Amino acid sequence: MLPKGLLKEYSHALSFVLRGLDVSAIFIAGLLAYYWKFGDIDLPDRYFVALVIATVMTPWLFRIFNIYESIRAKSFGQHLKSLAKAICALLVLLAGLAFFTKKGDDFSRSWFALWSVFSFILLISFRASLLVFLRFMRSRGLNERRVVILGSGDLRDKLTETVQEAIWTGFRIVALLEDHVPVALTEIEGVPVVKTPEDLSGYIRQNEIDELWLVMPLSAEDRIKNILHELRHLTVTTRLVLDIFGLDLLNHSIAHLAGFPVLNIRSTPMTGVNRFTKAIEDRVLASLILLMISPLLLVIAIAVKCSSPGPVFYRQKRISWNGKEFDMLKFRTMPVDAEAKTGPVWATSGENRATKIGTFLRKTSLDELPQFINVLYGDMSIVGPRPERLVFVEEFKDKIPGYMQKHLVKAGITGWAQINGWRGNTSLEKRIEYDLYYIENWSLWFDLQIIFLTLFQGFIHKNAY
């Protein structure tokens, strides 16, 4: 656990450096483009303001396109492809802002084009230079920590692979120690696998080891105590990587409870500041969205009322946070007696229960718009796992692993599963997998990313019916 946290600490530090480089690249590219076009760098106020707006938007937008995630799991070429998409999105947003504020004529189009080209060149150059610098430091042993891992199993192998690929951490794994080494096993990821020496403290002194990482299961308490006793006279940093990943973990962390260290195996991220942030996000955005779409809501309400007898809204009991029921609002898309004979049934492709206007509303997901009212009431969030009816919750909770864990947060209008295509009559297992990933990785920025992507790919979908 601790090395994982340490890796995150290094990763966050590198991410902070990259943000600084990106902001600098965007601003410097604007200056270079202006100099190339006009022959000086004495920016008029309007150009300076444009550069400031772009630099403020850059970290937020680049995060949406996963620019600051570690690139060890993908090639540098894939990273550059994501970078190009992020730059294009930034330019589109800036052009749209200039259009809506009617300021487009105040700027040179050729300057804007040059700014785009220089931005991409500088962003690539900065990243390449940083990677070369990190590789140089690591190859010279600068700021390097010599590490030995003692343990075995898949967790040990995965940890070794991760550290070996993460050159920026400064960790160098010298050896993998194992009490019972298989004959055929000589190395993993280029690191030699050797039998644990009888004189472990002497081995650590002789090889100038800075850190010892113990990869042990929870049942290895006696073995861990013996190792710590043997190393009691050394100053080597010792970390315990608990082999807990066979457990059903969700939003796990290490905390202190009444002075005792505890492992949170399953917990909601919506506590403390996070809960307050999520509430503010929901109320503010829902209020703004309802204000903007109010004319559309009126038009749809009239169309629904004229399509068939019955109310405009359809209220349906759904399950949200902590398993609580609430009345979810939708525009009515079926006749009022559509389920009188069948009872609750799962919506499927090709069914003909909906009215003509209802079919259109379902295809475009416009029938979901009244749920922003649910968000204002506090029953739902804008982003979260989609809520289900109690009858289906009871049916799925024993069939789908981890199904009930999606209720550790409020149900949402849109979600990570929905924008990835897992909606309608698709795999429930995959949908829950994406819902649990959202809960595990929740952040305000992740919510904004999902909302942003929903605008482009979340409404009209082949599985919306």
Image: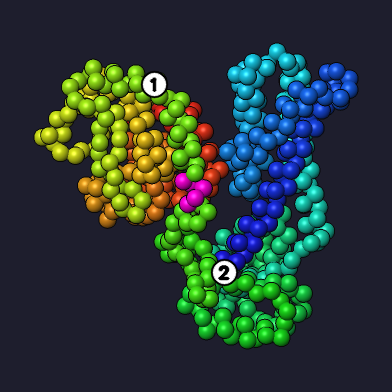
Rate crowding at label 2 as few (under 14), some (14 to 19) or many (20 or more) other CA atoms within 10 Å.
many
Q: State yes or no: discs 1 and 2 in contact (Cβ < 8 Å).
A: no
177 shown above or below 317: below
* Farthest left residue in view: 341
Q: Which mark is residue 296?
A: 1
- The residues colored magenta run 275-279
Q: Amino acid at mark 2?
A: Val
Mark 1 → mark 2, Cα distance in angstroms: 54 Å
- Nearer to me, 371 or 70: 371
Q: Position of residue 421 (x, y in %)?
A: 41, 35
Q: Marks 1 and 2: which is nearer the front?
A: 1
Q: Quadrant of residue 124?
A: top right
Question: Helix or strand or loop: what does disc 2 sit on?
Answer: strand
Q: Position of residue 72 (x, y in %)?
A: 64, 49
- Decide whether residue 368 is among the magenta residues: no
36 shown above or below 202: above
Q: Which mark is residue 241?
A: 2
21 shown above or below 456: below
- Counting residues from the start of the chain, the first of labels 1 and 2 encountered is 2
